[in-house]
Image (cartoon, grey):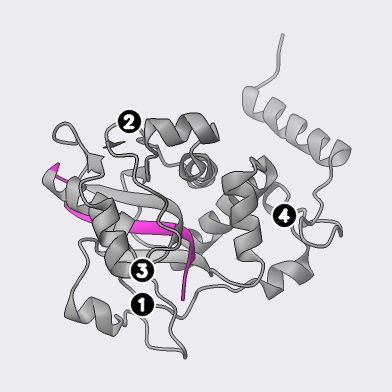
């Protein structure tokens, strides 16, 4: 007879760590063994640009430490349609390389690492846990070209680490919008307007939108407006990185 599934899974995980030990994706040194193994060494992990001093609502980095719960001037003037945001890193130093590898080159080891780091940040902040994770959807044409939705794949790692469900079907991207990269803030808002659709009322009152990188916040704001109309009352934004 087979043993207990949990025990068997633990044995397989330990065996995999012996046969394929974690290796730092940045310098090639042995990776961290904690947390199921990380493809990142302690030295490189310490040098990553963590995003701890940031706006409570949109997670834009501050130039200097501020009291917890501080909102940036932009959020005070024009509050976004979501309650809070957190991002594991600032989008600088090694982070663009890691995100780019996960997003455009199918590096599943980087997807796993970024998801683990985001889950770590959630545990550190310890916000009220949402009922469900909602990864930012890709349009069907972009999904066919790329072959996967990096936000969904990162969400799978976070969901497993934090024991949360994922909803990747209730909201769709209806417009194949051009990439946001290279557009200024006003153009980004115009580009994403009307790009998402929730066909009906959602069963969730509290969700966390999950994305790889938040730049101006136009994408998560537009998705939040759609979710509000679909009945969601409390929206968090969780991201791997936030641009300064």
Residue at (71, 25) in percent of width and height: 8
Q: Which residue is mark 1?
A: 55
Callout in the foreground (3, 2):
3
For disc 3, the neighbor class at 10 Å (few under 14, some 14 to 19, many from 20) is: few
Mark nearer the N terminus (4 vs 2) = 4
Mark nearer the N terminus (3 vs 1) = 1
Residue at (77, 61) in percent of width and height: 26
Give yes or no for residue 227 being in the magenta stretch: no
| 221 shown above or below 43 | above
Callout in the foreground (1, 4):
1
Residue at (79, 57) in percent of width and height: 24
For disc 4, the neighbor class at 10 Å (few under 14, some 14 to 19, many from 20) is: few
Mark nearer the N terminus (1 vs 4) = 4
The span from disc 3 to disc 1 (Cα, nearest Å) is: 21 Å
| 172 shown above or below 194 | above
Give yes or no for residue 235 being in the magenta stretch: yes
For disc 1, the neighbor class at 10 Å (few under 14, some 14 to 19, many from 20) is: many
Mark nearer the N terminus (1 vs 2) = 1
The span from disc 3 to disc 2 (Cα, nearest Å) is: 30 Å
The span from disc 4 to disc 3 (Cα, nearest Å) is: 41 Å
Position of 151 compared to 236: left or right? right
Horizontal and vertical percent position of residue 216: 35, 67
Q: Which residue is mark 2?
A: 169
Callout in the foreground (4, 2):
2
| 172 shown above or below 91 | above
The span from disc 1 to disc 4 (Cα, nearest Å) is: 30 Å
For disc 2, the neighbor class at 10 Å (few under 14, some 14 to 19, many from 20) is: few
Of helix, strand and loop, which mostly describes the magenta segment? strand
Can the viewer see residue 81 in this picture?
yes
| 20 shown above or below 124 | above
Q: Which residue is mark 3?
A: 184
Over which residues does the magenta segment extend? 230-244
């Amino acid at each position: 007879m087979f043993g207990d599934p949990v025990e068997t899974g633990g044995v397989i995980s330990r065996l995999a760590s012996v046969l394929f030990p974690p290796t730092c994706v940045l310098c090639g040194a042995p990776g961290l063994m904690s947390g199921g193994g990380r493809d990142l060494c302690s030295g490189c992990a310490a040098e990553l640009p963590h995003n701890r001093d940031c706006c409570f609502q949109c997670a834009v980095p501050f130039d200097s430490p501020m009291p917890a719960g501080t909102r940036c001037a932009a959020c005070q003037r024009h509050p976004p349609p979501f309650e809070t945001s957190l991002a594991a890193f600032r989008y600088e130093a090694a982070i663009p390389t890691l995100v780019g590898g996960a997003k455009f080159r199918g590096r599943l080891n980087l997807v796993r690492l970024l998801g683990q780091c985001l889950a770590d940040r959630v545990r550190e902040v310890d916000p009220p846990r949402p009922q469900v994770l909602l990864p930012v959807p890709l349009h069907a044409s972009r999904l066919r070209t790329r072959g996967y939705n990096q936000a969904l794949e990162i969400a799978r790692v976070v969901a497993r680490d934090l024991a949360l469900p994922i909803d990747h079907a209730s909201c769709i991207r209806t417009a194949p919008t051009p990439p946001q990269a290279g557009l200024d803030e006003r153009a980004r808002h115009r580009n994403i307007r009307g790009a998402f659709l929730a066909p009906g009322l959602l069963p969730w009152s509290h969700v966390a939108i999950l994305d790889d990188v938040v730049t101006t916040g136009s994408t998560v704001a537009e998705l939040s407006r759609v979710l509000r109309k679909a009945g969601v009352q409390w929206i968090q934004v969780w991201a791997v990185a936030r641009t300064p």
